[in-house]
Image (cartoon, rainbow, N blue to C red):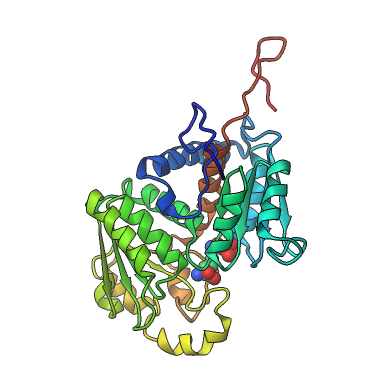
Amino acid sequence: MTAATSGPESPLRGRDLLSIADFSAAEIEAVFERATALKAEFRTKHRHDSLPLGGRTLAMLFQRPSLRTRVTFEAGMTQLGGHAIYLTNDVVLGARESVRDVARNLERFVDAIVVRTGPHEVVAELAANAGIPVINGLTLREHPCQALADLLTIRERYGRLAGLVVAFVGDGNNVYHSLSLAGALFGMEVRLAHPAGYAPNERIVATARAFASKSGGGLTFGNDPAEVVRGADVVYTDAWTSMGQEAETEERRDAFAGFQVNAALMRAAGPDAVVMHCLPAHRGEEITDEVLDGPQSLVWEQSENRLHAQKGLLVELLGEVPVEPDESGARGGQ
Ligand code: CP
Ligand code: NVA
């Protein structure tokens, strides 16, 4: 995006979300509050009385497969009165035309863009050239929409974030990066158990450490999953091989063999710990059926919260279309 078109409603109006580090804790809190209100209304009525995104359009540039991100953004736009256009083979970024030209066209057609691709730089280039909000729907570096839903889920479960311990078991990947930044912003202790060679990005760790030093949170690292999960409130895992790394699948399977979230690891964590996974799960690899489907699993609530968190995000970024009183003086819908 270019200049922020900040309206009175939200300091997030017109902003991009490329990294969790783009937002402050207070701004993320505003997304949570909006999401919580929308969730409560939708759970009760299965619809929204006012349609805050009436007439708004979201372009979805997806260069990678998706279930949750695609469906929750599309359904979310519909539920809020707007429309989403899913673009995959039609727009291969940088192939038929440049990323910059794609941005300069889309900003004239739609109100926001969600983009999923491998290189983070492509999303940054799109955002730099589009005067509308650009949302990172996953790159190899970050998955900020996932982290919004993750913290919303933890907040619902425990009623707070500061002081909680989240232990991530596996790869120091995109999901870990966004979760660690978000957890550090909110004063959480974020631990990572990873095999040698699969440490997270050092710059992201440095940013998260800076956030943690202000919030009272902390970041720790270890190579022994049982030790890292001990006393954790949340045990989190993700795929050993992320999209775009398929050529490394076999070597990663060997490297991560001792990093499975299973019943024995959950015993090490303790009976009160919950289990989270961004999904898709690779049952029998990073997580067992018993844990994923067991009583400590929070993954389905976490998955549902992608919908609510992103609806909150969209309304904060785009602002609410005002509802005009009709001729009888009643507030009409869109
Ligand atoms: N967690 C997540 O982003 O899922 P999808 O890849 O299905 O969108
Ligand atoms: N780390 C995984 C997350 C999928 C939602 C990947 O990038 O493929």
The quadrant of the image that shows the C terminus is: top right
The reply, left or right, for residue 249 in relation to residue 97 is left
Q: Quadrant of residue 255?
A: bottom left
Q: Where is residue 46 in the image (x, y as percent from the top left)?
A: 62, 40
Closer-to-camera residue (37/316): 316
Q: Is residue 69 above or below residue 279?
A: above
* Residue shown at the point (48%, 66%) measured from the top left: 141
The image quadrant where one finds the N terminus is: top right
Q: Residue at x 46, y 41 (%)?
A: 31
Q: Can residue 190 be seen in this view?
A: yes
Residue 296 picture location, percent across and down:
39, 64
Q: Position of residue 71 (x, y in %)?
A: 64, 55
One can see residue 276 in this view: no
Q: Residue 124 vs residue 61: left or right? A: left
Query: Residue 262 lies in what quarter of the image?
Result: bottom left
Question: In percent of the image, x 25 and y 49: which residue is there?
Answer: 215
Image label count: 0
Relative to residue 89, is residue 255 drawn left or right?
A: left
Q: Give me the residue at 31% from left, 62% from top.
A: 206
